[in-house]
Structure formats: C-alpha cells, structure tokens
Image (spheres, rainbow, N blue to C red):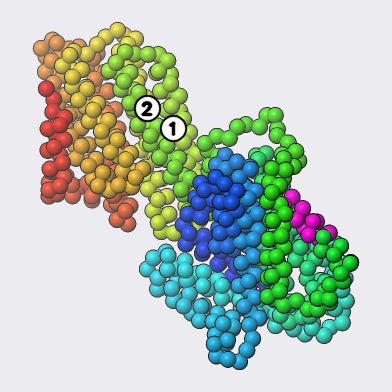
C-alpha cells in the first residue's frame, strides 16, 4: 500500500463522512422539524417511545443526532428522563438501517437486473437526478430531496474509493497480523470504541468496516469485537453535548453509555462463553458487508430485548451516578431555547414561535388587566402584578430575539426563514404593547392617587375606545398565532377607526373644557391615555401587516398601507364602515 493509496483512503473517508452528513441534514430539512416535534410529544408508552426512536433514527440516519435531541429535550424540561430510555433503545436499532443500505455495494452478478441494483450502476444516476433537482427545484422540498440523493451518491462513491484503496491489503501479511491482534475481544472492542469516538458516528464507522470487508479478508473473530466497540464509541456525542447541560441532561448521556456498555458486556460474555464450549466454525471465515450489517443489527436487537424490561433499574443507576446539585435551579421556560436545538433549525424555530405566542397572550393579558384597573376599582397589588408581567415580557423579548438572530445565521428552508423574519418583526411590537399597557395602568394609579375622576361622558368614551383596542389586539394576536390572513386583514380598518375615535374624544374633551365641565389636568391624563391606546393599535397594525406581507414574500409595509388608505380597496371600506358603526360614540 503506497502513499497514493493512503491519499485515496483518506479522500474516500472524507467523501463518505460528508455524504452521510449531507444526506442526514437533507432528511432533517425535509422533515421540517416534524420528527423532533413527534419525539417531543408522542412518548406516552414504552412501546411508542421505542418505535418513535427507531423510526426517527432510521429517517435521519443517526442515533447520535437522536440522543443529542433527547439531551436537549430533558435539559429544557420538555421531556422526563424516564421517557428517553425506550427511545434510545429504539434509536440503537434504527441506526442500523444505514449499514443495510451500504451492504448493497456487495451485490454481484452479470444479469442486467442485478447490475441495476449495484451502487456503481445507480449512484451516478442518483447524483445526476439530485443535482438537477437542486439546480432546477422551485421549492425547498425538491432541493432538499436532491441534496439527499447527492449525499447518498457521494457516500457510496466514498465507500467505493476506500474499498479500492485498500484492495492491495488482501494478501498483505503485515495487515493480516494486525487483524489477528484485533481478534482479541478486549483489543477489538477498544479499537472500535476509539475509532467511532473520533468520527462520532457508529453508522460511519460500520460503513468504513464494510468498505474494508469488500476488498480485504476480515474474519468474524476480528469484525465482531470491533463492531461491539463501535457501538460504545458512538456514545461520545451525547456525552459531549451534555457537558453544558443540567443534571438530567447529563443523566441522559450516561444512560446512553450504560445501555451500550451493559449490552456489549452481556453479549460479549455470553457469546465468547458459548464459543469456548461450541467452537463456532464461522469465526475463522471472512465477513461480508452484508454480514457486518447483520451482526450490527443482531447485537442491537439482542441488547434491546435484554435491557427493555430493566428500564427502571437503568434509570436509577443513572440517577445514582449523576447526583443532583443542591443549588441547581429549576427548569424555566427559556430552557426551551437550548443550544443543541440550533443544529435543528426547524425545531428551534418552532420553539421560538411557541414562546412568541406565549408572549403575545401575555401582552394581551397585560392590557386587559390594565384597563380593568382603569375602569373598575383600583388595586395596588394588581398594579404590581402588571409591572411584574411587563418585566417578564421584556425578558421574553430579549431572550427570544437573541436566539432568533442565532437561528437566522443557520441554513434553513425558505418557510423557516419566513417564520424567523415574521417573529423578529413582531416580537418588538408585542413588547411595546406591554409597555403601553403598563402606561395605562400608571394612568389608573395616577387617577387613584390624586383622587380625581373623569366625567360620565368621558368614561363612556373611554369604554368605547377600550373595547375597540381590545378587539384590535385580539385580532392581531389571533392572526399571528394561527397564521390567519383573513383575520389579519380585519386589523387595519379597525386601527383606522381607533385613530378616528381618538380624534373625536379629544375634540369632545376640548368642547367640555370650554364649557367648564372638565379640567386641564384631566385633559392631560386623557390625552396620555388616548395616545397609549392609539400606539397599541399601531403596533397591532404592524403585526397584521407583517403577517400579510411575509406570506406574500415581501415586506413593502408602506406600499400595502397606502393601497388600503387610498380608498380603492372595497373590502377595506366595508370593514371600516362596520367598525365605525360598532364603536360609535354616544
């Protein structure tokens, strides 16, 4: 084996790893965060958790990625530690799908039908089709499907390059003596563990072993312990991911280690004890890519069957190993913005959307409580609660916008990109709505502290504009949460009515002031109150327009508003007239 063969081996390995990474990323983008959401929600039973772990991992081709998700879920309080065990066991079997796909490289035969199933026959076609889908695809689904096909083609080309580069080793005595050394179970397990820990993927390391098996004579006595070690090595990824997490996330990582190590120890001891008595004849024969896939799958199935009844004991072992810290804080809502989810942009976007929806509802609650304080009996404790709620909304705005900016730097689908843009535009408006709601509460406090009151006519006017503002806020939030454009279109005409109400109420106050029925001091307070109502309706307009414009792949806010206000839109005029009648002053 010369220097050029080594270059070819390294190049093939890099192509193989890149192809696997590209294929996995494309599959995750195609899923659009649905797989992560399914894992998050549907784990009510052990069997369901097991099947979900198997299915999700079979799709994304990586048990490491699945376990990293679980670390993030547990760290953010989305999932409990006990729910993860059956999912991990399912993921261990799901990850073996890749090895079965790679075993197609071994298909041999002269018949045309058989040749069609050989990778060297169909992967060039997949590469061409994939490239055309990427270059000409008009939507993310087609482009991601194309990237998945290209990734698989690169993976198979890389495997072929690795296999060709080591073909000279088949009759190399030095290489054979090294393989004999690995037939020692402890040495083989150790090598497999270290190699997989370095490349952080059991699917990839199994693939490398399959590539070697295609060109070199590797006996079962060497392959079996190496495969067992590769299953342990893959746990390095969740372990590294959990280092910055809380106690429970570290327990998920140690669960992965225990599940693999216990499985390897039990299977190794049982197998080699039987071998010492029965002297399995196949141990000196050579493995194939297909039998490597079979051994890999068989180990994980046996390990799962053995460990599944002992989920509770494994959980207790993990809890005893990683003890709780006395001063560790409890999980809070912002833990959902976990660092690990940035590797899954679709899911990270969904977590942000959920928080923004919570924030929107809190802003609405803040306004309702403030107006209740204004129009009903004043309560100092309630005023303090409104202040606390407004501070919490500020925190939501700070944490969520920072996380959204980090997501925006990632590669994501056009759909997710739209959602990120929408949330970033709307989140500031929601925070400002809560600010103005607090201002309304402060007006109520001022009226109470100074022991003054509005006239009956002014109170009637305030109630009308309060109801209108409450409705426009409800419409804007509904359009944001439900992505309902028909509701969003109702916001702007009502916002115009609120502007009109403000002008009319101010004019009425000036008239009463001239007649001596009102005071300058109450006039300033009323003006401040009306300004806050108007600003809230303006921010509602911003939210609704944002929802409408982003859905149409543009953000020409001023152009859209100018079209509405020009009077050429019949639908707008009709809604404006309806709202004007609904909120007419007495």
> Is 135 placed above or below 579 here?
below
Which corner quadrant holds the N terminus?
bottom right
Looking at the image, which residue is at 13% across and 37% down? 578
Q: Who comes first in sequence, dot 1 or dot 2?
A: 2
Q: Is residue 338 visible?
A: no
Q: Which residue is mark 2?
A: 366
Q: Which residue is mark 1?
A: 393
Q: Is residue 203 left or right of residue 381?
A: right
Q: Main secondary structure of the magenta part?
A: helix
Query: Outermost residue, bottom direction?
Result: 110
Q: Position of residue 164 (x, y in %)?
A: 70, 83
The magenta stretch spans which residues? 258-269
Q: Position of residue 275 (x, y in %)?
A: 85, 67
| Label 2 neighbour load within 10 Å: few <14, some 14-19, many 20+ | many
Which corner quadrant holds the C terminus?
top left
Query: Outermost residue, top direction?
Result: 451
Label 2 SS: helix
């Amino acid at each position: 084996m010369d220097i050029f063969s080594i270059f070819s081996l390294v190049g093939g390995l890099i192509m193989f790893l890149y192809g696997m990474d590209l294929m996995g990323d494309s599959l995750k983008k195609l899923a659009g965060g649905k797989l992560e959401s399914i894992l998050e929600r549907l784990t009510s039973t052990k069997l369901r958790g097991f099947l979900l772990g198997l299915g999700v991992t079979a799709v994304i081709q990586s048990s490491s990625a699945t376990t990293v998700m679980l670390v993030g879920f547990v760290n953010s309080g989305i999932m409990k530690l006990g729910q993860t065990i059956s999912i991990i066991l399912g993921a261990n079997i799901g990850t073996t799908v890749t090895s079965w796909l790679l075993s197609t490289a071994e298909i041999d035969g002269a018949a045309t039908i058989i040749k069609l199933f050989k990778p060297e026959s169909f992967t060039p076609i997949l590469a061409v089709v994939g490239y055309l889908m990427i270059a000409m695809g008009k939507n993310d689904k087609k482009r991601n499907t194309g990237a998945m096909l290209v990734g698989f083609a690169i993976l198979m080309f890389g495997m072929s390059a690795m296999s060709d580069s080591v073909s000279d080793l088949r009759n190399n005595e030095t290489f054979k003596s090294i393989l004999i050394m690995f037939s020692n179970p402890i040495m083989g397990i150790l090598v497999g563990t270290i190699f997989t820990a370095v490349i952080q993927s059991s699917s990839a390391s199994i693939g490398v072993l399959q590539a070697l098996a295609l060109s070199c004579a590797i006996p079962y006595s060497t392959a079996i312990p190496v495969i067992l070690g590769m299953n342990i090595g893959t746990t390095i990824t969740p372990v590294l991911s959990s280092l910055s997490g809380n106690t429970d996330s570290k327990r998920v990582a140690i669960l992965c280690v225990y599940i693999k190590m216990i499985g390897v120890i039990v299977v190794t001891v049982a197998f080699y004890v039987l071998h010492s008595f029965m002297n399995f004849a196949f141990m000196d024969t050579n493995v194939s890519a297909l039998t490597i896939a079979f051994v890999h799958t068989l180990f994980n199935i046996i390990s799962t069957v053995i460990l599944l009844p002992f989920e509770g004991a494994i959980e207790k072992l993990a809890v005893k190993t990683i003890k709780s810290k006395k001063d560790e804080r409890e999980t809070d809502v912002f833990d959902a913005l976990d660092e690990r989810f940035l590797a899954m942009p679709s899911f990270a976007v969904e977590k942000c959307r959920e928080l923004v929806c919570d924030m929107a509802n809190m802003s609405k609650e803040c306004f309702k409580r403030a107006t209740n304080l204004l129009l009903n009996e004043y309560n100092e404790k309630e005023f303090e609660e409104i202040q606390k709620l407004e501070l919490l909304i500020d925190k939501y705005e700070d944490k969520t916008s920072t996380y959204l900016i980090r997501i925006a730097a990632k590669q994501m689908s056009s759909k997710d990109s739209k959602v990120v843009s929408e949330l970033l535009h709307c989140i500031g408006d929601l925070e400002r709505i809560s600010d103005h709601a607090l201002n309304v509460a402060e007006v109520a406090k001022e009226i109470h502290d100074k022991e003054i009151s509005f006239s009956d006519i002014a109170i009637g006017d305030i109630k009308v504009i309060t109801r209108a503002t409450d409705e426009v806020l409800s419409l804007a939030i509904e359009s944001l949460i439900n992505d309902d454009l028909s509701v969003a279109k109702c916001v702007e005409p009502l916002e115009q009515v609120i502007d009109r109400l403000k002008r009319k109420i101010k004019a009425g106050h000036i008239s009463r002031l001239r007649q001596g029925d009102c005071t300058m001091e109450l006039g300033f307070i009323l003006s401040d109150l009306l300004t806050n109502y108007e600003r809230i309706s303006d921010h509602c307009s911003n939210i609704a327009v944002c929802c409408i414009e982003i859905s149409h792949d543009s953000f020409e806010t001023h152009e859209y508003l100018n079209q509405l206000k020009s009077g050429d839109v019949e639908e707008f005029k009709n809604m404006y007239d309806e709202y004007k009648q609904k909120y007419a002053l007495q």
